[in-house]
Image (cartoon, rainbow, N blue to C red):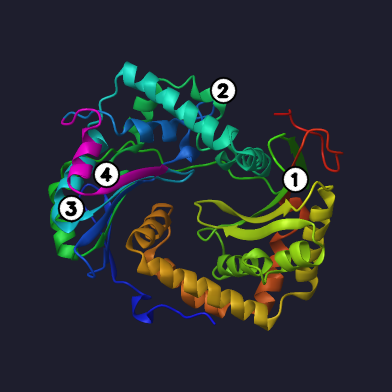
């Protein structure tokens, strides 16, 4: 039996306002301890990387920890650590964020630090070249060194034929090394400004306290009236089912992934994103799911299976299916099982029991997220930065509860169709091809 956490934590108080320079501020009240989560989100990410310069948004994220007009290189980190806090940064296709977790009494200081580097970063050639080496090693470790990450990268490049989501956040290896100081400086000048940023403060604070501190720090930065609007090319209507095959001698058994192109939370009609999230949960959320029962328990062709709705995006989202083979077997067996399960849902739908169980699981995850100050602040920051309203986020639970069996069947029929899919298989060299032609061996 699933025991739910305190329902009183299910809906924290959130307020939003703007500074005179255009910077949006969201305050999330959490008075359980004198601790705050402080985040700055920029409305830019790898989706704004110019063609031929993939990785520039992530590259600049690294350079933001270098010197400013007021601080030496590395001093930002030393100050936050000395104050007993921790910090990090993250680049996605849609956002770039910087955050600190720190005692409330030091909130003003971290605001001063972030406001400073928003407009005062000083780039020097020697540090730029050194950081490029760091980023290239990060790519070698996190992508080239990870078979499933390589497969994911190749599949996204197939799924998105015209959209920047098809380019890796870290950048293509052959383009990273060509990035320059001027590339980073131009990107910084274009996108890093208060009127292109969101401040999120969660913790033991009031709206008035945050407003006063924000005006004294971020409010002193001038807006950039030349910030480019977020205009991205759209995907053409998908017409062809796509497959790809990657050979890699490092894997022990084949991996099969399938991606379906679907609407994101931001882009979907009301209730459709929630239906997709519930459908993914039913397909592969746990060991009661359809994928697990069919692939692992009944057919015994997979050691692991799963499904996920990746809907937190400015533009389109994805439904992901995963099958990790239990032994060296033809990948078409897992693909065929995917096809069977999807066809069953499209034709016959799901059961009341499956839908109720999925709703309970999503509600539990939501409440646990709310109970984690940093995780909840990150979820709100990401959603607001990509253009969702706080009221829309607050209504998610009600929309989940309103999803019906007919909605699940309708959404599966509309979006889980072959022409909206890319199926990728990673196999050991020499495995008998069953889909597509092989990519270069590794």
Position of the N terminus, as image quadrant, is bottom right
Q: Are marks 1 and 3 in contact (CB under 8 Å)?
A: no
Q: Nearer the viewer, mark 1 or mark 3?
A: 1
- 10 Å crowding of disc 4: few (<14), some (14-19), many (20+): many
The numbered disc on residue 174 is: 2
In-front residue for pair 146/104:
146
The residue where tag 1 is placed is 254
Location of residue 302 (image quadrant): bottom right
Q: Is residue 306 left or right of residue 33?
A: right
The answer to whether residue 297 is visible is yes
Q: Is residue 68 left or right of residue 261?
A: left
In-front residue for pair 389/333:
333
The residue where tag 4 is placed is 194
Q: Are marks 2 and 3 in contact (CB under 8 Å)?
A: no
In-front residue for pair 233/192:
192
Q: Name which of mark 1 and mark 3 comes first in the sequence.
A: 3
Position of the C terminus, as image quadrant, is top right
- 10 Å crowding of disc 2: few (<14), some (14-19), many (20+): few
- The residue at 49%/21% (across/down) is 177
Q: Disc 2 and disc 4: Cα gap in Å?
A: 33 Å
The magenta segment? 70-90
Q: Name which of mark 3 and mark 4 comes first in the sequence.
A: 3
Q: Disc 2 and disc 3: Cα gap in Å?
A: 41 Å
The residue where tag 3 is placed is 107
């Amino acid at each position: 039996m699933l025991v739910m956490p305190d329902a009183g934590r299910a809906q924290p108080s959130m307020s939003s306002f703007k500074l005179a320079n255009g910077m949006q501020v969201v305050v999330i009240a959490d008075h359980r301890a004198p601790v705050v989560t402080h985040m700055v989100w920029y409305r830019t990410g790898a989706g704004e990387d110019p063609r031929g310069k993939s990785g520039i948004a992530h590259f600049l994220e690294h350079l933001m920890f270098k010197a400013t007009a007021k601080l030496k290189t590395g001093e930002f980190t030393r100050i936050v650590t000395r104050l007993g806090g921790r910090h990090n940064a993250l680049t996605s296709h849609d956002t770039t964020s910087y955050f600190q977790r720190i005692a409330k009494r030091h909130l003003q200081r971290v605001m001063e630090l972030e406001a400073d580097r928003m407009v005062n970063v000083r780039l020097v050639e020697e540090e730029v070249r050194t950081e490029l080496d760091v980023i290239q090693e990060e790519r070698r470790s996190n992508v080239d060194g990870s078979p499933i990450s390589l497969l994911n990268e190749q599949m996204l490049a197939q799924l998105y034929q015209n959209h920047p989501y098809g380019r890796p956040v870290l950048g293509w290896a052959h383009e990273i090394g060509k990035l320059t100081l001027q590339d980073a400086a131009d990107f910084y000048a274009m996108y890093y400004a208060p009127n292109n940023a969101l401040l999120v403060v969660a913790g033991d604070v009031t709206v008035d306290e945050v407003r006063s501190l924000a005006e004294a720090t971020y409010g002193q930065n001038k807006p950039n009236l030349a910030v480019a609007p977020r205009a991205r090319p759209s995907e053409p209507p998908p017409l062809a089912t796509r497959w790809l095959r990657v050979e890699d001698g490092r894997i022990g058994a084949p991996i099969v992934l399938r991606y379906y192109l679907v609407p994101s939370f931001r882009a979907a009609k009301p209730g459709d994103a929630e239906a997709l999230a519930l459908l993914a949960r039913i397909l592969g959320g746990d060991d009661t799911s359809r994928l697990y029962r069919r692939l692992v328990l009944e057919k015994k062709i997979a050691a692991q299976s799963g499904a996920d709705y990746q809907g937190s995006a400015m533009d389109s989202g994805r439904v992901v299916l995963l099958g990790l083979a239990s032994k060296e077997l033809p990948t078409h067996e897992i693909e065929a099982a995917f096809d069977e399960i999807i066809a069953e849902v499209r034709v016959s739908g799901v059961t009341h029991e499956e839908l109720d169980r999925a709703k309970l699981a999503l509600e539990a995850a939501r409440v646990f997220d709310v109970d984690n100050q940093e995780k909840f602040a990150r979820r709100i920051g990401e959603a607001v930065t990509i253009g969702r309203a706080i009221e829309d986020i607050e209504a998610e639970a009600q929309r989940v509860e309103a999803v019906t069996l007919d909605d699940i069947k309708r959404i599966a029929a509309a979006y889980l169709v072959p022409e909206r899919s890319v199926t990728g298989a990673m196999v050991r060299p020499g495995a008998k091809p069953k889909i597509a032609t092989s990519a270069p061996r590794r």
